Image (cartoon, coloured by chain):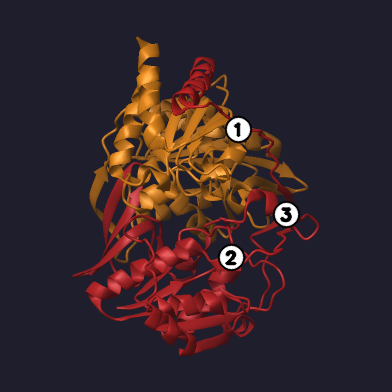
Amino acid sequence: MRTLVCMKTILDPDVPARDFAVDAARREAVRGGAALVPNVFCENTLEAALRLRETAGGTVTVVSDGVAECEETLRKALAMTADEAVHVLRDGAGVPDAAEVAGVLAAAVRHLGGFDLILLGRESGDWGLGQTGGWLAEELGVPFIAFADRIEPSAGGVRVRRHTDNGHEVLEAPLPLVVTITNSDATLPRIPKARDVMRSYKAPVTTLSAAELARAAGAGSPSEPLWHVVELAVRTREVSCELVGGDSLEEKVDAFAQRLVAALEGA
Amino acid sequence: MSNDVLICLIAPRQWDRASAGLAGAGQRLAAELGGAVHALVVAPASPGIAEELARLADSVAVVEAVQPLDPEPLLATAAGFARDLAARAVLLGNDAASQELTPRLAARLGGSPMSDGAAVTFADGRIQVTRAVYGGKAVATYALGRTPAVIWLRARAQAPGVPATSPGGVRTIPTIEPKAAFPRVVERFEEPAEGIPLEEARVVVAGGRGIGGAEGFRELAALAGVMEAALGCSRPACDEGWTPVSWQVGQTGKRVAPDLYLAVAISGASQHILGMADSRVVAAINTDPQAAIFAHASFGIVEDYRKVVPALVARLAERRR
């Protein structure tokens, strides 16, 4: 089984709201002192791929389409024991849309000799659009399954468990296949072992150029972007929280219960 | 390309707020564009759904399927229908099947996909969508470049449609099956519907990482019982396997807007806040006075939930008697 895991690097989503700002003119978030981190759904995705490798064998390659700092995400993936890392290097300007990223990823898939399974996170923790996986499946002309959390080998390809609105489904799927992965107890990312972290520093990372891949893919005729952001504003919410007081636990609980009852009666 | 709007309902179980909201959004966008609104309903649970749709849409096409369709025939059928209709926009709901379908349908139709729309309008010659971004810390408006616009919406939050004077016609269309092998659903599991559905509830009690295990959620269930509330959780509780994935409230879980939301041992990561920020009153129980959840709550208590919850259950049970 040759598996490709596509990973994105994003602005740390746990930056508190009070430290979050946007550049309204450029319509982008201001980075400030925030770190760039792997998108958590991409880590769930890698975990799903590594668990599949345990039962099906084969290799797990990770690819990231992004700026130079994405290499950190790839190193972390190697520390989680991905076999191979590929950085599709993009020069900083602008935020590419899902069609552009999927086009580059599809070109990378072909350049690297094809894969049985191509996995992506269900969405990212920054813009959160969740469109790249489905678009990539169409770009490659292969079937697509969203919101999966477990993949196992089967006679005809793979068995995929995916979450639905009120439960789950299991699908029998032929390969090749594009799947997006969601969070659950089956995809909780492993903590890398110290030894694997050490090894990841020295492991090679293959670098490809996003612009060259896009050209190779024949994206010569520029098409209309899927979307552009015309307005971006911080959501302001002013709530002042009253923390109930009291000399004993009982007094505090009483005060809290009274507030709850008032809210319930107002409900 | 027409100025018509197509609304797509996939495997609806009943005529509910989401169906009515989607129809309403379709009617309003069609009015802005000066076109008609058409509906495609795939595998409805009952004929009554198509009848309700016919009161709100100019035409209704029904794909009769015993089971909800597998993803590939669903895509082929919806794309075939939308292509023939040459709609300017295709609107879908926020169910998992619609979310899965959106990018592929847009790609097949040569259009622009968009997700998680809170509002859709037509402005400056473009279909525009407003949605939360950065875990709800910001709001963005996107102008869509290609036609048709294929958008899944927060359907429940849309104002319901207004019945037309003359009902539209209802017809049945066939399923299109791809020739190549495709993934097939071989097992389907639905959690038993217990108590009040999370998205419908007027009161929600939700637990987070600080609950510490499945046992703690049984205590929360007792509290939810006396408060006549639905139970929810934040992402860590679901990732630890303490709760079903369907309980998750947040960016990637359910969006709720109850009259009262009680967050228990939830730190308040933005992923979670996005799912409950529209609640009328938020209350929180947390041991950490610096927890981000308190910045979103009207009142709170800084205590261990293990001490507070049993006392609350006793107090609130007294009130009910």
Residue B30: quarter of image: top right
Compute the Cα span from label 3 to label 2.
Answer: 15 Å
Secondary element under disc 3, as helix, strand or loop, is loop
Assess disc 1: are there few (<14), some (14-19) or many (≥20) residues with their C-alpha within 10 Å of its C-alpha. many
Assess disc 3: are there few (<14), some (14-19) or many (≥20) residues with their C-alpha within 10 Å of its C-alpha. some
**Which chain corresponds to the colour red?**
A
The label shown at residue A10 is 2
- Which residue shows up at 60% across the image and 68% down it? A36
* Residue at mark 1: B27
Compute the Cα span from label 2 to label 1.
Answer: 37 Å
Near-viewer residue (B170 or A18) = A18
- Which residue shows up at 47% across the image and 90% down it? A202
Q: Position of residue B160 (x, y in %)?
A: 55, 27
Image mark 2: chain:
A
Q: Amino acid at mark 2?
A: Ile
Quarter of the image that includes the C terminus of chain B: top left
Secondary element under disc 1, as helix, strand or loop, is helix
Q: Are marks 1 and 3 on the same chain?
A: no
* Residue at mark 3: A21
Q: Amino acid at mark 3?
A: Ala
Q: Position of residue A133 (x, y in %)?
A: 47, 63
Left or right of A216? Residue A234 is right
Q: Earlier along the polypeptide chain: callout 3 or callout 2?
A: 2
Secondary element under disc 2, as helix, strand or loop, is strand
Near-viewer residue (B99 or B256) = B256
What's the colour of chain B in the image?
Answer: orange
For marks 1 and 3, give the one nearer the viewer. 3
The answer to whether any part of residue A233 appears in the image is yes
Image mark 1: chain:
B
The answer to whether any part of residue B168 appears in the image is no
